[in-house]
Amino acid sequence: MRIDRRSGCPINLSLEVFGDRWSLIILRDMIFGGKRHFRDLLNGSLEGIASNILADRLKRLMELGMLTRADDPTHKQKAIYSLTEMAIALVPILAHLGAWGRVWLPVSEELSIRAELLEKGGPPMWDRFMDELRHEHLGTPSDTPPDATVRATLQAGYEAVVARKAPGAGCDAVA
Amino acid sequence: MRIDRRSGCPINLSLEVFGDRWSLIILRDMIFGGKRHFRDLLNGSLEGIASNILADRLKRLMELGMLTRADDPTHKQKAIYSLTEMAIALVPILAHLGAWGRVWLPVSEELSIRAELLEKGGPPMWDRFMDELRHEHLGTPSDTPPDATVRATLQAGYEAVVARKAPGAGCDAVA
DNA sequence: CAAACCAATTGCATTTTGCAATCAGTTGCA
DNA sequence: TGCAACTGATTGCAAAATGCAATTGGTTTG
């Protein structure tokens, strides 16, 4: 599962990067879920990735230049993973992918609300979101207040759906 | 490699559809290369798919509703494969994917000129291309003359690059 | 009538995946 | 201090997917 370079076609090479079942899931959880640690990615994703596969994919995505790894200063053995610009540039693709899936596949309502909001926001929202990610992961300066982020908007939409579908559950239902 | 439905997330479900190394390659060759027959797909793609995998993926894409299969009236054992609207709707994703690959991966110039033209054309060009595909594959009426198609434009761009890189080779160099 | 072509299928070795158990070191709490 | 919980992984193993070559039964072409 390294790169074969079967051909120099852009679509083929893109597939060689994330044409598997887990790489994009990991990037999705980092981009939309804000996950930065091994354990968060391991336990947090709905799909249940195995730890050996997660370790392998993190390594591979680092080799490919999509992620970087740094020691977490608050915990001697904690590693913190960051997106590179190469990974942040996937946001429009993920937005289109989510929009396509919402139309053509049996998605669940709770999990597709984010895709819907992102689709409605269009390229301007994608650009704002990419700026936020650059701020979080690359240390780029940002003038967006923390409570007005795209991620907060998406999360609020998700929680509204969950609350509406399970009215007795209160407001603590977070996946 | 059927669908597991690990979760109802649109991105996850999309990955379950074409999160492998061949499905999207086949769709690329049908969409951009105009391939409709088993042999064309088998011999025509640069990446060299094996016939058993091609057969498996064609079957799978049909089960998923991305392709249909019909007998070719001109040849009793020839099958002709057609894209469905579900597959044609992937054009914007393929355009973004090509654009991303062109920036971040070691693509070859000949093979990325199509992606570049498609990116420059933007959504209006994608829409025209999707209409052409509907005309070819779904029998939808079309008012575009055959010599002004997006596919012809992309092919002309490709041939111009090939001719420029190998000036002595004449105009018969087609992959 | 033979050679080429058609869409697959079969057999088999290699690779990848998924799962569970485990690892050594670190931290939080009593 | 002692011990459980947590950290990012690693190992072993069975099952599945892949890649390759050969083959199949039928059709068309020269």
Image (tube, coloured by chain):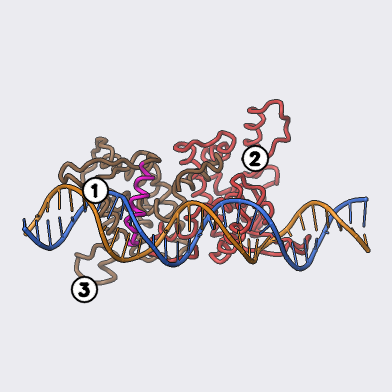
Chain colours: A red, B brown, C blue, D orange
Report the residue marked by disc 1: B148
Along the polypeptide, which appears first: circle 1 or circle 3? 1
Q: Residues within 10 Å of mark 1 (few under 14, many from 20)?
A: few
Query: Is residue A155 depicted above or below B112 in this figure?
Result: above
Tag 2 and tag 3, C-beta contact below 8 Å:
no
- Amino acid beneath label 1: Ala
Q: Is residue B49 magenta?
A: yes
Chain of the residue displaying label 1? B
Which residue is found at the position 16% from the left and 46% from the top? B75
Q: Nearer the viewer, mark 1 or mark 3?
A: 3
The disc at residue A155 is: 2
Report the residue marked by disc 3: B168
Q: Nearer the viewer, mark 2 or mark 3?
A: 2
Image x and y of residue A139, in percent:
67, 59
Q: Do the residues marked 2 and 1 share a common chain?
A: no
Secondary structure mainly formed by the magenta segment: helix
Q: CA distance from mark 2 to mark 1?
A: 46 Å
Whether residue A153 is visible here, answered yes or no, is yes
Foreground residue among A33 and B58? B58
**Left or right: A9, with A46 as reference point:** left
Q: Do the residues marked 2 and 3 share a common chain?
A: no
What is the span of residues highlighted in magenta in the rendered image?
Answer: B46-62
- Which quadrant of the figure has residue B71? top left
